Structure formats: structure tokens, C-alpha cells
Amino acid sequence: MKLAVTYENGSVFQHFGKTAQFRVYEIEDGQIKSAKTVDTNGAGHSALAVFLKELGADALICGGIGAGAVNALGAAGIDLYPGVFGNADEAAQKFAAGELEFDPDAHCSHHDAEHGHSCSSGSCTHKC
């Protein structure tokens, strides 16, 4: 299985649609076999679902995520684990072991961080 995690400076990045990098893990038998960091090359929001599908991702761990991206990931057949904070490698290890804590209801609805947005389930690190 291939797991992608929104990534910035070693941590789970908290705004899916603006992630510049993913940390991608190959998982077999509950163990991480390999990990690499890939750039999104400027793709954003729903285009990231296509990017992840082309990458071969089966699942995604992220922080906040909007409804459009949730729908695009679902259409791409990618399982979603939102509302995750902290170290990306630790989150991937917990996922591999079946111990990841996440918030299936976490979502963020952003128009622009400066012009207001709404967050729910505490999944967003923007000032709400």
C-alpha cells in the first residue's frame, strides 16, 4: 500500500489544498518499507487528488481539507484520514500499525486566510 501525507518541515501540513510536498510511504505487513518526499509542482486543491492518483496513493493523511478535495479524493479511490497533527513519520508509523488517531469530520472551508474562512473539528491551524 502507498500512503501519502501532506508535508512541511517534518510535520503533517494543515491545509491540503496548499501543500507543496507529500511524504510518500510504502507500507507492507504493518511496516514502513520506504519513504520519500515529492513536490506537488504547483498543483493545488482538487488537482492534488489527480496528482496523488497518478502517484499511486491508496490513502492520505492530512490536517484540514475542503469538501471539494474530499470529493475529488473519494472519486479517485483514495482513503482519507484528516485532522492529524504532528510529525509526519510518526503519523505514518501509527497508520501502518493501525493506531492512527484522526478526525473523519475534520474539514476546512477557506476562501482566503486574510479574508476569512471557517474551520471545524479543530483541524485547522489558521486563526479561526
Image (cartoon, rainbow, N blue to C red):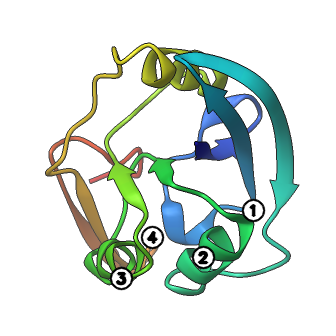
Q: Quadrant of residue 73?
A: bottom left
Quick check: marks 2 and 3 in contact, CB under 8 Å? no
Q: Please, is residue 9 above or below residue 48 in the view?
A: above
- The numbered mark, 4 or 3, whose residue comes first in the sequence reads 3
Question: Dot 4, crowdedness within 10 Å: few (<14), some or many (≥20)?
Answer: few
Q: Nearer the viewer, mark 2 or mark 3?
A: 3
Q: Amino acid at mark 1?
A: Ala
Residue that badge 2 annotates: 48
Say the numbered circle drawn on residue 119: none
At mark 1, the secondary structure is: loop
The x and y percentages for residue 26 are: 70, 36
Q: Amino acid at mark 3?
A: Ala
- The numbered mark, 1 or 3, whose residue comes first in the sequence reads 1
In the displayed orientation, state which residue is furthest to the front. Answer: 29
Q: Nearer the viewer, mark 1 or mark 4?
A: 1
Residue that badge 1 annotates: 20
- The numbered mark, 2 or 4, whose residue comes first in the sequence reads 2
Q: Amino acid at mark 2?
A: Leu
Cα distance between the residues tagged 1 and 2: 10 Å
Q: Nearer the viewer, mark 1 or mark 2?
A: 2
Looking at the image, residue 115 sits to the left or right of residue 71; the answer is right
The x and y percentages for residue 21 are: 76, 55
Q: Nearer the viewer, mark 4 or mark 3?
A: 3
- The numbered mark, 2 or 3, whose residue comes first in the sequence reads 2
The residue closer to the viewer here, 61 or 8, is 61
Residue that badge 3 annotates: 75
